[in-house]
Amino acid sequence: MEATITEPAHTLPVTTDYGYNSKIEGEIVVTRVDAALNWFLKNSLWPMPMGLACCAIELMAAGASRFDISRFGSEVMRFSPRQSDVMIVAGTVTYKMALAVRRIYEQMAEPKWVIAMGACASTGGMYRSYSVLQGVDQILPVDVYVAGCPPRPEALLDALIKLQKKVARQPILANLKRDSLPEKLGSLDFKL
Ligand code: SF4
């Protein structure tokens, strides 16, 4: 016996006009310029992977298929600071590397953000030694800290979501007038 399919009471018309028609109410999206710009930015945060130690393995795992960072629009890992939006500092920042990390950050275009991934990047971790910077926030303005040694890839994704919420709320038009980067970094006390 042949199966019978009952049509729902309300069905979409077979032919639909998908073209833009400003005279039909409901096809117009109204928003603010800053809300639209923030929406574009928060869904395409391209990372600058600053992998310095073991935490970088978890960063790599976040990009692999099991955790799939591309679900959040951040799969495009750039190894050029000029094409990156968010620096993910994953690992121990030694004094030897600190200036290189800061220089790469300075080469990134505004707007830009920083995630400190793991105990080492956030605070120096277990390395209370002469050779390790006690937190990358001594040289960079960190937006999100991720706890753990190492943090799991889910923790990094959680940090990314938190950063997306922060980006969505930022007053981007007002930020165009904010202080220049050298002045901002000049306020950070960092001496080797
Ligand atoms: S926080 Fe732990 S896992 Fe991450 S770089 Fe430091 S020692 Fe390695």
Image (tube, rainbow, N blue to C red):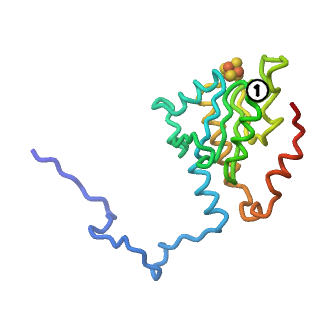
Which amino acid does the dot numbered 1 rest on? Lys
Taking depth in this image into account, of 91 and 166 the one nearest to the observer is: 91
The answer to whether residue 121 is seen in the rendering is: yes
Q: Dot 1: what SS?
A: helix
Q: How many marks?
A: 1
Q: Residue at x 73, y 39 (%)?
A: 144
The answer to whether residue 149 is seen in the rendering is: no
Q: Quadrant of residue 173?
A: bottom right
Q: Residues within 10 Å of mark 1 (few under 14, many from 20)?
A: few
Q: Quarter containing ligand 1?
A: top right
Q: Residue at x 79, y 64 (%)?
A: 177
Establish if 36 lies above or below 5: below
> Does mark 1 have its CB less than 8 Å from ligand 1?
no
Q: Position of residue 134 (x, y in %)?
A: 82, 26
Q: Residue furthest bottom?
A: 23
Q: Position of residue 55 (x, y in %)?
A: 64, 24
Q: Residue at x 67, y 54 (%)?
A: 168
Establish if 82 lies above or below 15: above
149 sits to left or right of 189:
left
Residue at mark 1: 96
1 sits to left or right of 21:
left
Taking depth in this image into account, of 130 and 32 the one nearest to the observer is: 130
Q: Position of residue 1 (x, y in %)?
A: 9, 44
Q: Residue at x 48, y 31 (%)?
A: 64
Establish if 191 lies above or below 57: below
Q: Position of residue 35 (x, y in %)?
A: 65, 62
